[in-house]
Image (spheres, helix red, strand yellow):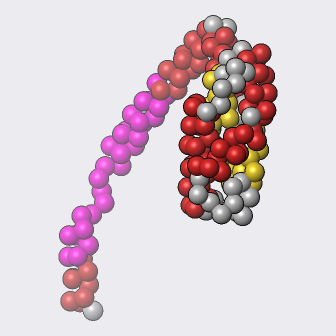
Amino acid sequence: MNTRLERVGQVIRDEIADILRRDIDDPLIGFVTLTEVDVSPDLRHARVFFSVLGTPEQIKDSIKGVLRARKHINALLADRVDLRYIPKLRFVYDETAEKAQRMERLLHDEGGNLGPDIARHEAADEKAMGAADSDSAEDEDFDDEFGDEDPEPEDFDAAEADDEGQG
């Protein structure tokens, strides 16, 4: 994304957050967090992504309150931001935080059921580590068996010098 569009989106996000905190007095709007603002390249439209913490009923009420206050927020934004065009705001509920909490709950709940599986996997890991240790011991035996018969680099130079003198 264009850095100018990112900066404009950031300014719009900050101003809308301030408007929601200070100027909108709607009892339906609960704990709303603005997560991102995507601004169109012509600056005529902006999608404002927001999330809400609370019960499903509180979430529905907050969404309803934000959507109801959209035009008023747009008007207040026009007074605060100095742009040629004030983008038409479209509020979009962002379910990312809710989905993350749900996944965390599922993983936490399944953690108790995974006890025998975890023990089995840990035993397999220890067995694999033991095999890896024995492989490294075999590599050392391999090196000992063949020894260090490679000539030193100095030997190559001396052999080349002898060949040059003879030929």
Residue 102 visible in rendering: no
Q: Pick the residue in front: 93 or 75.
A: 75
- Among the 4 quarters of the image, the one containing residue 53: top right
Residue range in magenta is 130-158
Quick check: is 141 in the magenta stretch?
yes
Instruction: Report the residue at 57% width, 31% height from top.
Output: 22
User: In the image shown, does 40 or 104 lie closer to the viewer?
Assistant: 40
Q: Position of residue 115 (x, y in %)?
A: 61, 8
The count of marks equals 0
Q: Is residue 119 left or right of residue 100?
A: left
Q: Nearer the viewer, residue 134 or 89?
A: 89
Q: Residue at x 52, y 26 (%)?
A: 128
Location of residue 7 with respect to 66 vertically, above or below: below
- Residue 86: say if magenta: no
> Where does the N terminus fall, quadrant-wise?
bottom right
Q: Residue at x 72, y 50 (%)?
A: 46
Q: Within the image, what quadrant is residue 166 found in?
A: bottom left
Q: What's the residue at 47%, 26% (across, down)?
A: 129
Image quadrant assignment for residue 64: top right
